[in-house]
Image (cartoon, rainbow, N blue to C red):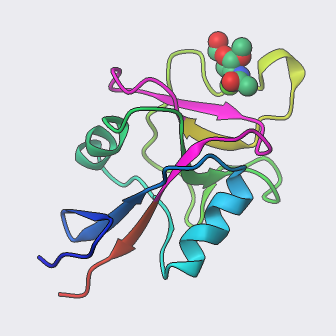
Amino acid sequence: PYFQRGWVYFRSSLYFISSLKKPWQESRVDCLQQGADLVIINSREEQDFIRKFYGLIWIGLTRRGHNGTWRWVDGTPLTKSYWSPGEPNEFEGKKEDCVEIKHHEMDDSWNDIPCEDQNFWICEKMVAV
Ligand code: 2F8
Ligand code: CA
């Protein structure tokens, strides 16, 4: 592996955990400016690793601009998902098109919420091997 200040290494990727809160799109722009993107969760191991960071955290999953279908920021469709019980639910008819990690203590912890809400975020970049 290799190391970079402010980034955490896990299974061939580096992860950056924000100390600010921003809306989903602005969080994504921060990642892109750092040569990364919002985190894409591909396995139970990665889900467990990510959810253990305390706080409400944006992940790189949205249905905004995709006719209501969930897409990862790299354009791939959602195959494995880790929704909290009852989610996604567009709570009280609100448009909830972006996804946060909500319960760090629960295996399944994703929640759909409005993209304009402010959360922490996690960026991911693959490490060239
Ligand atoms: O109970 C689940 C529900 O909790 C909140 O609404 C009260 C969430 N909304 C926000 O955090 C804005 C819902 O997305 C969530 O489904
Ligand atoms: Ca919800």
Residue 78, how many percent across, how many down? 54, 51
Looking at the image, residue 39 sits to the left or right of residue 23; the answer is: left
Closer to us: 71 or 1: 1
Q: Magenta segment, principal secondary structure?
A: loop
Q: Residue at x 79, y 53 (%)?
A: 64
Q: Residue at x 50, y 22 (%)?
A: 84
Residue 89 in sight in this render? no
Quadrant of res 100: top right
Looking at the image, residue 3 sits to the left or right of residue 79; the answer is: left
Residue 44, how many percent across, how many down? 28, 42
User: Is residue 109 one of those drawn in magenta?
Assistant: yes
Segment colored magenta:
101-122
Closer to us: 1 or 111: 1
Q: In which quadrant is the C terminus drawn? A: bottom left
Judge whether 96 appears above or below 63 on screen.
above
Residue 83, how many percent across, how many down? 50, 29
